[in-house]
Image (tube, helix red, strand yellow):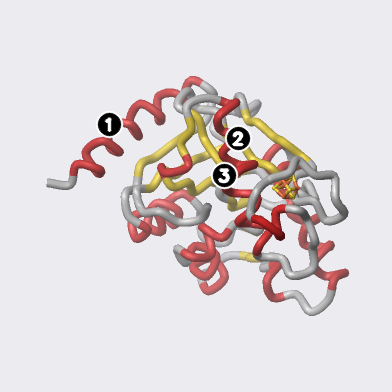
Amino acid sequence: MDYKHMRNELMAQKLIKNFERRNMEAYYCPTKEEVLAKAKELVPEGSSITWGGSVTIRDIGLTKMFDDGNYKALDRDKVKNPEEYQSILRKAFELDWYLTSANAITEDGLIVNIDGLGNRVAAITFGPKNVLFVVSLDKLAKDAESAVKRVRSIAAPINAARFDNIKTPCKVDGLCHNCNAPGCICNFVHIVRNSGIKNRIKIILMDDNYGF
Ligand code: SF4
């Protein structure tokens, strides 16, 4: 008997209702294979699509699926220069779909993200016609306060470790020092309370642990 799955299934059903109360559409797909199938079902072929810097959506093969498929994908990982990169970040606002993960979600259905440049939280807020989150259930926090704590103490320092070109205090000891250092990746703290446009924001919850 997979007790973790049993518990996650119950929790996911509760979360789906809480997201629905907030004008968001949510699904529970335990495995990454089921996530990919659900994403394929949700995003019509031919859609224009891009994504944020999330590790989760790359590691489960979601970005590759859209890159290789019959979609108008703008892949920021394949740009040749910084100008092209910036151009994709700006074009994101006019596309049909934006893919990302979340840094944390809460039991009552808030979505919490912390961003350095701000392009991801900007696209979540406004622009793309649809925003699709893929979030592992291990990112669930009790409430907004504990979600922000989780992001600051776990997700952000691990995320900072990915970038060779920044010298934030968390790169030295792995702990958040609430810094204002150049290259700080925690410039914007963003909470989605409701989707202003019904079901513009969609969430796929998964058991498999991806991202941080
Ligand atoms: S030390 Fe700075 S960059 Fe690192 S997690 Fe804390 S606020 Fe973010």
Question: Which residue carries the number 1 mark?
Answer: 10
Give the crowd class for mark 2: few <14, some 14-19, many >=20 residues within 10 Å: some
Q: Is residue 137 left or right of residue 100?
A: left
User: Hey, which residue is sitting farthest front in the picture?
Assistant: 173
In terms of secondary structure, where does tag 3 sit? Answer: loop
Q: Mark 2 points at which residue?
A: 149
- Amino acid type, label 2: Lys
Above or below: residue 20 compared with residue 100: above
Question: Is ligand 1 within 8 Å of the beta carbon of the residue shown at mark 1?
Answer: no
Question: Which residue is located at x 58 percent, y 44 percent?
Answer: 103
Disc 3: which residue: 102
Q: Where is residue 41 in the image (x, y as percent from the top left)?
A: 41, 52
Mark 1 lies on a secondary structure that is: helix
Say whether residue 51 is visible.
no
**Residue at the extreme bottom of the image, as rendered:** 80
Mark 3 neighbour density, 10 Å: few (under 14) some (14–19) many (20 or more): many
